Image (cartoon, rainbow, N blue to C red):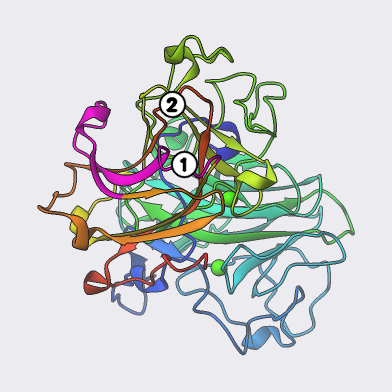
Amino acid sequence: MIYTTTPKALAARRLRQASILLALLLAAPAAMQAQVSVPYTENFDSYTGTGVSANSEYVSSFSTRTKPTGWLFPFCYEGDSPDDDAQGDIWLGQAVNSTYGSGSVYPGSVTHLIYKAVSDGPAYSCLPTVSHAVSGLYVYFDYQLENSGTSFSLGIVSQAAIDAGNYADYTVLKEYTGTYDTWISVEEDLDALVSASSYSGSTASGGFRIVLQYTNTFSTNGFRGYVDNVVVSTHPCSLLPYSETFDTYTGTECSNGTACISSNTEPPTAYPNHVLPNCWDFPSMASSHSTSTSNPTLYHPNFFLTTSSSYRHSASNGLVFKSLKKIPAVALLPDFDVPASNLKVSFYYRMDNTSSAYTFQIGIVTDPDDTSTFVPLQTYTKTTTWTQAVVSLADLLASDYEAGTYRLAIRYYNPISSGYRGYIDDVAVCRNEAEEIYACACNSYT
Ligand SMILES: [Ca+2]
Ligand SMILES: [Ca+2]
């Protein structure tokens, strides 16, 4: 599923700052392909220097081109005299093309994969062999396209087929198009896709590979596609560091029912059937929306994404909290698979009014369906300018909460009969430094 079309998806997020160190490459005999265990993450950012293109074209010598560890590029051009439109060209780069598009690198990214193809065939890449059955796996990646007529597809191939040299014997599971020059996040429950396909290698003993295929229907025009932040995981929403800018969600007021994000500070017209951030839950959200304040159970609380420039810290979206008359608006962050005391949280917030009556709190709920279990840990108030909150839960918790027994929550409280809202943006969750094993995303937005 694509975030832009899925209100409350089941699965988790791509990682923006994930370290390649998380990809635990298992030792394997030379004759075998290395397998990776899950969770597997690859943001390509550890690849720099020689063999990585500093612009949007190939490195000067293909023979020295750097490739991400464990990946296969079966039809990738391997020679030293590249045909500019050769089928299946894929390389690591640090910029996007300015001739064909006006996009940008993924926020905070150093390096990504660049795909180039023309109509004589797609360019496709195979992730490292995953030493896990397909069952229970989720796949995430971010992609960007430059024009219509281009797309990415997710596929799957058994390692046995690869070992037999049948590289192209993969099954395409789903195709992705979308807004050009914009990064779009994909998350997929592999079980669901595979069960609906003819793929028969889901429990193949030799493992399997995820395939990312890029297609360009133009015969000569070298539009590119870009991929970053690839993740294969068994546990949606649990990977750290986690970040959410709300910016990968696109579309405005519910056009054709495909996407609805408010362009102002009122809920989208199709509320509550609008886009909300994946992996978050909103247990206090009203079931319908009325603009009348006479019935607060209809009017509040509610949550929605807005593109309004004053109410986002980073473009293009921020998250709006709306409540009044002592009904707090509680948003639950994703379910992280570590004890609460291991976590550090950062987010930006602002309000409509500087009265101390309006508060944001970061806290814990022990029952995700019951917002009365909310335990506040830190309170923020009195600002109409974007302000960063950074808290270590280890410093705030009186007792620990084991993984699976809590959800981090942000609570907005408006005790007054007015429609003053609260806004948050650029949420990041990482491990406390004492527990640090991955690069921390918590300072990414300073
Ligand atoms: Ca990257
Ligand atoms: Ca944002």
Q: 296 or 268: which is nearer to us?
A: 296
| Amino acid carrying mark 1 in the image | Ser
Counting other residues with Cα less than 10 Å from the Cα at mark 2, is it few (<14), some (14-19), or many (20 or more)? some
Q: Are marks 2 and 1 in contact (CB under 8 Å)?
A: yes
Q: Is residue 8 above or below residue 209?
A: above
Based on the displayed image, in which of its 4 quarters is residue 59 positioned?
bottom right
Q: Secondary structure at mark 2?
A: loop
Magenta span of residues: 352-378
- Residue 371 in the magenta stretch? The answer is yes
Alpha carbon distance from label 2 to label 1: 11 Å
Position in image of residue 23 (x %, y %): 36, 68
Q: Is residue 105 above or below residue 252?
A: below
Q: Which mark is residue 416?
A: 2
Farthest-out residue, left: 399
> At 90% from the left edge and 59% from the top edge, which residue is drawn?
220
Residue extending farthest front: 355
Q: Pointer 1: residues within 10 angstroms few (<14), some, or many (20+)?
A: few
Q: Is residue 300 above or below residue 132?
A: above
